[in-house]
Image (spheres, rainbow, N blue to C red):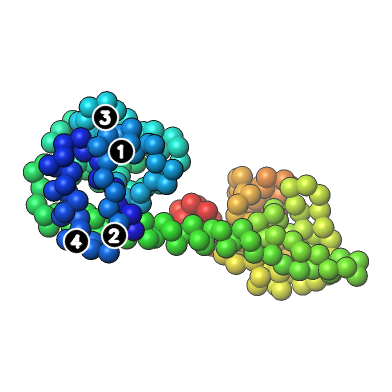
């Protein structure tokens, strides 16, 4: 875990680094004297303790630019100013440590930030794994590899499954229950003849699920469970 400390006051910077090392001895600590130094990095730290009042770029502006550049580091503002707490929400700060604070409080916040980063990394790994998941189907005597994330929805009629993709459709003979077993929790069987990818759901009611392309029937008895699973899927941010 890489933890950064950004403060233009040398004494405050060194003291923070010393305390961090006591609570997280295995971490790598990077010290920054300004927001400009942080932004000059190619690889941002996982956690950043950031002073708000600094010469040059303020901590708040530094955080804003970090987010603009796509950094998901856990930002912990360390300051004596109460007035900026609402701005901290705008840059998705993990915590706002108001001086003076105890060593125990710092340790508690650091441990929570570490767990937050570890959870985020696990989720990202899971997302990458899902992106690479594929099925192999037999189309006209030839084997074809299809990425699950490219399937908008599937429907079956007379033993023939149609995979509706964003560009074109693929038809093959098979069983919907076999396809359903391979797709995981990113898909849901709304009707005996339809299997939808939550990723492409645009709207729904008790009768139909409107997808990015086309729409699928939803059985009345499946509606409540569909809504529950779909809301759970969205809460994960997949």
* Residue at mark 2: 27
Q: Name the mark on residue 89.
A: 1
Residue for point 18% across, 43% down: 13
Q: Name the mark on residue 23.
A: 4
Badge 1 vs badge 3, beta-carbon distance below 8 Å: no
Residue for point 50% across, 61% down: 125
Query: Element type at marker 2?
Result: loop
Instruction: Identify the image quadrant of residue 181.
Output: bottom right
The one of 155 and 11 positioned closer to us in this rendering: 11
The one of 168 and 125 positioned closer to us in this rendering: 125
Location of residue 29 in the rendering, given as x and y in whole percent from the top left corner: 27, 53
Badge 1 vs badge 4, beta-carbon distance below 8 Å: no
Label 4, label 3: how far apart the Cα atoms are: 27 Å
* Residue at mark 3: 58
Whether residue 50 is visible here, answered yes or no, is no
Badge 3 vs badge 2, beta-carbon distance below 8 Å: no
């Amino acid at each position: 875990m890489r933890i950064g400390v950004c403060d233009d006051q040398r004494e405050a910077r060194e003291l923070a680094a010393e305390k961090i090392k006591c609570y997280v001895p295995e971490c790598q600590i990077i010290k920054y004297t300004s927001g400009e130094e942080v932004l000059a990095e190619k690889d941002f730290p996982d956690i950043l303790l950031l002073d708000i009042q600094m010469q040059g770029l303020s901590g708040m502006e530094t955080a804003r630019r970090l987010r603009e550049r796509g950094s998901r580091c856990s930002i912990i503002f360390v300051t004596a100013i109460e007035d900026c707490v609402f701005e901290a929400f705008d840059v998705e700060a993990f915590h706002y440590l108001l001086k003076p604070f105890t060593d125990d409080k710092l340790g508690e916040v650091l441990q929570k930030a570490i767990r937050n980063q570890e959870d985020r990394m696990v989720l990202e790994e899971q997302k990458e794994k899902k992106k690479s998941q594929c099925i192999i189907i037999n189309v006209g005597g030839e084997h074809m590899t299809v990425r699950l994330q490219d399937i908008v929805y599937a429907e079956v009629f007379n033993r023939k499954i149609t995979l509706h993709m964003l560009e074109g459709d693929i038809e093959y003979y098979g069983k919907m229950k076999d396809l359903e077993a391979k797709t995981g929790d990113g898909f849901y069987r709304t009707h005996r003849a339809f299997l939808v990818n939550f990723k492409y759901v645009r709207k729904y009611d008790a009768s139909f699920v409107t997808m990015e392309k086309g729409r699928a029937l939803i059985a009345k008895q499946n509606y409540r469970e569909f809504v529950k699973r779909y809301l759970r899927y969205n809460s994960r941010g997949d």
